[in-house]
Image (tube, rainbow, N blue to C red):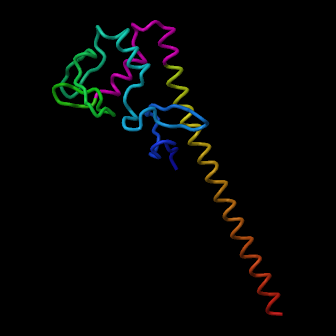
Amino acid sequence: MQVQCSKCFRSIALSDIVEFSEGRLSHVNCARPRTLAMDERTLLFVYCANHVVAQCLACGLNFRIGELAADPLGGSRAYQCPRCRKALTENVRTHVYGCARLPSEVRLMAQAVRQAAQHLVKQSQQARDRADVLIREAEALLFERQRALREVMSKRTAS
């Protein structure tokens, strides 16, 4: 079973942008779970506006952030190749976390935030899986005990 967003009830993927509030995980933006987070966009515009941030392998072209086409619906296609419309959002995200022009402290903190979010999603998934196993074991035990009770009761009524 997948961890579900507490707002839209869709599955949360490791690549989704999530928040943790009131003890529950949710998408930051349910309509666009894989678009760049505000912090990622800020880093792009502050540190990466004047150099290449994505390459379209299909076209063989490189793009700066201002040269990318934008999909108004966002999602994984929020940033696109202006020529072929191939989704480049993940390429842009990869650039943000590996850009040598970001101060190392900023880059390391951004990576730590992203890793913490992914770890939280993984831990939530593992906790849900463990809970599911425990529920199945409890159900099996209940079924077995109910069956045993019925057997004892049938023997009592037969005597």
On screen, residue 68 versus residue 123, left or right, reads left
Part of the protein shown in magenta: 88-110
Pick whichever, 82 or 52, lies toward us: 82
The location of residue 121, given as percent across then percent down, is 54, 36
Is 95 located above or below residue 88 in the figure?
above
Residue drawn at point x = 26 percent, y = 14 percent: 64
Residue drawn at point x = 39 percent, y = 13 percent: 99
Location of the C terminus (image quadrant): bottom right
Pick whichever, 44 or 28, lies toward us: 28
On screen, residue 35 versus residue 153, left or right, reads left
The location of residue 73, given as percent across then percent down, is 28, 34
The location of residue 19, given as percent across then percent down, is 51, 31
Pick whichever, 84 or 5, lies toward us: 5
Main secondary structure type of the part rendered in magenta: helix
**Residue 49 in which image quadrant:** top left
Residue drawn at point x = 71 percent, y = 67 percent: 142
Magenta stretch holds residue 41? no
On screen, residue 91 versus residue 20, left or right, reads left
